[in-house]
Image (cartoon, rainbow, N blue to C red):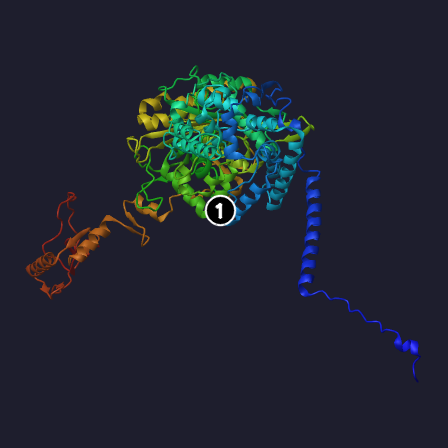
Amino acid sequence: MAQPQNEQNKPKTQKTNRRKLDIWNKLAVSVLSIFLVGCISVFFVLVNIINDPDGMRFSQDGLTTLSNSRLYDASGNVFYELGDEIREDVTYSQIPQSVVDAFLSIEDSRFFDHNGFDLPRFLKSAMANLKSGSLAQGGSTLTMQMIDNAFTKNQEKKLETEQGTITTAQKLKLKVQEIYLSLIAEQSINKEQIFEYYVNRIWFGSGNNTRGIQKAAQYFFNKDVSQLNLGEAAFLAGCINAPDTYNPLNNLNEANTKLDHLKAAQNRRNVTLELMLQHGYITEEEFNLASNQDLSFSLEYVERTSDDPNQAYITQTLSEVMELTGQDPAIIPMDIYTALNQDTQKQADEICNGNIVQFPNEYFDVGFSMIENDTGEIIAVGPGRRYHSDSVKIDYSTEPNQPGSSMKPLLAYASTFDILGWSTAHQVNDKKKDYWKNGSYAPKNSDGKYNGIMSLQDALGVSKNTTAAQAMIDLVTAKGYDYWIDYCKKLGFSDEVAEGFNEQYAIGGSSMRASPIQQASAYSTFANGGKRVDAHRVRRVVRRSDKKEFKTNAKTYDVISEQAAWMISQLLEKVVSGGYQNYNEILASNYTVYGKSGTTDWPANSYGIPEGVAKDEWSVGYTNKYTIACWSGYTTDAITNYGMYITWDDLNVASAFHISHYMLDYMQKYATYSALERPSGISDYKGGYIKDEFKSKGDTTSDNNDAQDACEASGGEWDEENQTCKKSDDKEREACEADGGEWDSEAGTCKKEEEKEEETNEAETTCTSNGGTWDGSACTYPSTEPTEPTTPEPTEPSTPGTDTSTDNTTGYVWLDRRNLYNIFDRL
């Protein structure tokens, strides 16, 4: 059917096709979507990090200490308050422009341009770290470093205290918070204030734990910060990333160090000067003049003596507080309660000042510590005779040295009562032997003598090395090395020392090192029933801002049994009172005291000191309440510059022993001394004591059943390879047979071929002359008719040695290796 005209003329509507997205557009949309989602996610993550209730919060009060931390003694009295002696703040206007320029050049050249976070510098550092595979480039602005010093470091230490280590995620979280707080800081305070806070809080390597650039200027150059010249300013700006390394004064007290601190400091100063030249702060002429100057000419250290007897204890306490709380008491106000006995500390200081105990000479030094046995609290320390005046403080109460024979009770003997079943009446064998299996017949005894079988008490009393070595070898055989590594850690020695354990530790050899504090803590085990409490000074800390309390984290370790602790103490009491004529007798008093000495020898060295002379001398003494350990010897300066060592005259002064005696005597006013109470589980045994669990078996190891011991006791020589005993006869027999002879074991002689032939001829002659027949090896005689027995006539008794034989003998005669015998005569 035909369509209407108007419909035919109506134009057709074109169908429009929707344009489809190609693959690239889809990809772009996807990337953009992911980017937006990522941005939103990052935003929420950052918000979450910033608003973390346990995270850092910016506070201007946190940049400065509104009140000072206070330290309290054991009686609750304030004995120290951190204040101006720690730092002396300066304003921005007091700081020379050269100092500002030096810090900006090496730390943050765009400081006055950025808002606290320098993104270009941060990205540049990040790319450099990716390229090098390290985190050497920090990218932190000076503002971020200020936040790091005031907040981040404290937060890091807090996390380390709570959980041991910080995860990578936590480090990134702290860095984000640090950046955020830097941005907030820039909005809250001006640039000049930020610079002030920064330079007034950092440590430059100056002594006595002092902070800030003013104290540093006084310490190194004896001048006010406003008087610093260009080279001095560059040095101070450059040294802060490694203050100890770049401290040129360290060379004064570390003459034997491999690092030249002065040279390192001068090189670092020149790096700062180069950057100042590069950034246009100084001219080429100024650079050349300052960089060519010898830094030592600028140094003007003035020895500042401190008359505070508590100074060493304070320094040790502040370090302990930082470990305990994770925060710096020089910045965060705290109330710190310690175990310090001020009266005892005053006596320790008087000793170090030479007012109580005699010293051999001015170079001879000491370090000691006194600990309360049942609490592990350090009540006083003696840091040494030069601690108050040395530019670089060396505290000999914390300085590790070789402890010598003072290790014998701790390692070689105390555990034998638990592990080997020894009694205090045990017998040991003092003999020459290659104990260390190195072909040296070591160790030797100090007197060069070997006494053979002797009592354990005597071996400890005269400090035999051989018996201690053998005991340690037996203990290691019984328990293995891992046990003794852990044992050393329980005694309180450092992980590094403990991990290096070997049998030589039993006599204080090899890499065994201990400080007086560590040695006193270890010996407190004997007086505390076999338990040791970590040595510590801090009882508790209260953070003043929020009253949060931190209690001591000292742990208690079960080291040996209560019975073993008492048994070793009985032997150590005899070391003092047993009449062994040694320096330990100096400790004897009107109360029961236990003690042990320790001496180390100089090995071959480059100081011109004779090999084998004394290097360290120790005295350790304890009562039922307190333990003291004292090291004595020569300073590094005396050794390196004068080749000084402990002579017999020095030993006879016995400074360490007199210190131990005096301090234990002095402490009687604070405690009642008595002999250690005998615990249950111990039986009397052969004049000594043994643990009940070993009584039925007995101390069988006291008998000399060892094959090697028996061999050597009988004059033989032990063949280690074949595990056999060679006596002198065996050696001669081997030589005889090797020479073609025949060994007569009964006569102990060697018969050669000609001697045997001569003997045979003699036998043949005797045979034939008596009417016998010789067949080459034996003689026979003709038989005779038997006769009636007659009663013999009585005869006079023969005289000893008279030959009563008749001429006509009957029977068989054989060749004896020494003489011819008639068989009937022998019967």
SS class of the residue under badge 1? Answer: helix
Examine the rendering and report whether any part of residue 647 can be seen.
Answer: yes
Quadrant of the frame with the C terminus: bottom left
Q: Is residue 132 left or right of residue 191?
A: left
Residue linked to disc 1 = 482
Is residue 390 positioned above or below 455 on the image?
above
323 sits to left or right of 11: left
Left or right of 519: which side holds 463? left
Quadrant location of the N terminus in the rendered image: bottom right
Give the image quarter of residue 118.
top right
Residue 638 screen position, x and y as percent: 35, 25
Q: Please state if 221 lies on the left or on the right of 2 as rendered.
A: left
In front here: 124 or 374?
124
So how many labels did they put on this image?
1
Q: Indicate the position of residue 374 as horizontal and vertical percent values.
A: 57, 29
Where residue 305 sits in the image (x, y, percent)?
Answer: 46, 17
x%, y% of residue 277?
Answer: 45, 33
Residue lying at the far top in this picture: please name it: 355
In depth, the one of 376 and 200 nearer the eye is: 200
Type of amino acid at the residue the image marks with label 1: Asp
Is residue 243 at least partly visible in the picture? no
Query: Which quadrant of the structure image shows residue 273?
Result: top left
